Image (cartoon, rainbow, N blue to C red):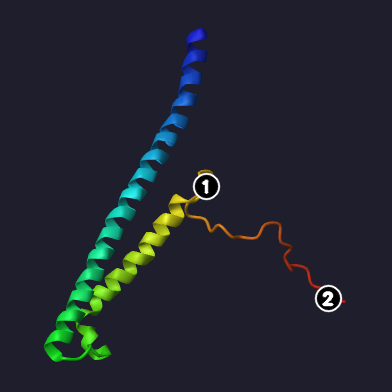
């Protein structure tokens, strides 16, 4: 009988540790992703600036909007990275007890207008 009690208490503790370890690993993964994406975004910024500088040197004028369309994919990727980085930072700063897939600003205990006065 004593063995059953010990076994039951061990099985209850183990999942808590596993969740805690997974959360730590997840935070580390998020930080790594933020670093990688930030480095890529900085590289794209330099590529864009270099392209603009080279264009200006060879054409003796700054690029127009239509000229910049040649490097539009770089701008789009950089913008997508910025959005992704912010989402990762938000996830990283989210309280541990809050689910990551739920909005953080939902009102609570708000009355609903389900009943209407029909008289």
Give the SS element for disc 2.
loop
Q: Earlier in the sequence, mark 1 or mark 2?
A: 1
Residue 78 in percent (x, y) is at: 29, 69
Q: Report the Cα–Cα distance between label 1 and label 2.
A: 45 Å
Residue 36 vertical placement versus 12 (above, below): below
Seen at 41% across and 32% down, the residue is 18
Above or below residue 90? Residue 62 is below
Binning the other alpha carbons within 10 Å of mark 2 as few (below 14), some (14 to 19) or many (20 upward) gives few
- Label count reads 2
**For residue 50, which quarter of the picture?**
bottom left
Identify which residue, 61 or 16, lies in the foreground. Answer: 61
Residue for point 28% across, 64% down: 41
- What is the quadrant of residue 113 in the picture? bottom right
The relative height of residue 109 versus residue 97 in the rendered view (above or below) is: below
Q: Closest to the observer: 10 or 79? A: 79
Answer with the quarter of the image where residue 40 lies.
bottom left
Q: Give percent across and percent down for residue 62.
A: 23, 88
Where is residue 88 drawn, in percent x and y?
A: 40, 56
Residue at left 52%, top 14%? 5
Q: Residue at horizontal 53%, vertical 59%?
A: 103
Which one is in front in this view, the residue at disc 1 or the one at disc 2? 1
| Element at label 1 | loop
Location of mark 1 (residue): 95
Numbered circle sitting on residue 118: 2
Q: Position of residue 112 (x, y in %)?
A: 72, 65
Q: Relative to residue 21, is residue 44 drawn left or right?
A: left
Q: Nearer the viewer, residue 69 or 8?
A: 69
- Along the viewing direction, whichever of 47 and 27 lies nearer the viewer: 47
Marks 1 and 2 in Cβ contact (< 8 Å): no
Task: Characterize the local packing of mark 1: few (<14), some (14-19) or many (20 or more) Cα atoms within 10 angstroms.
Answer: few
């Amino acid at each position: 009988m004593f063995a059953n009690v010990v076994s039951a208490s061990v099985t209850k503790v183990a999942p808590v540790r596993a969740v805690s370890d997974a959360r730590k690993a997840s935070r580390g993964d998020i930080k790594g992703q933020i670093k990688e994406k930030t480095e890529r975004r900085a590289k794209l910024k330099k590529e864009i600036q270099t392209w603009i500088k080279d264009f200006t040197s060879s054409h003796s004028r700054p690029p127009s909007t239509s000229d910049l369309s040649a490097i539009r994919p770089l701008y789009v990727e950089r913008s997508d990275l910025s959005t992704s980085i912010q989402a990762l930072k938000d996830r990283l700063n989210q309280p541990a007890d809050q689910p990551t897939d739920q909005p953080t600003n939902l009102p609570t205990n708000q009355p609903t207008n389900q009943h209407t006065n029909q008289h």
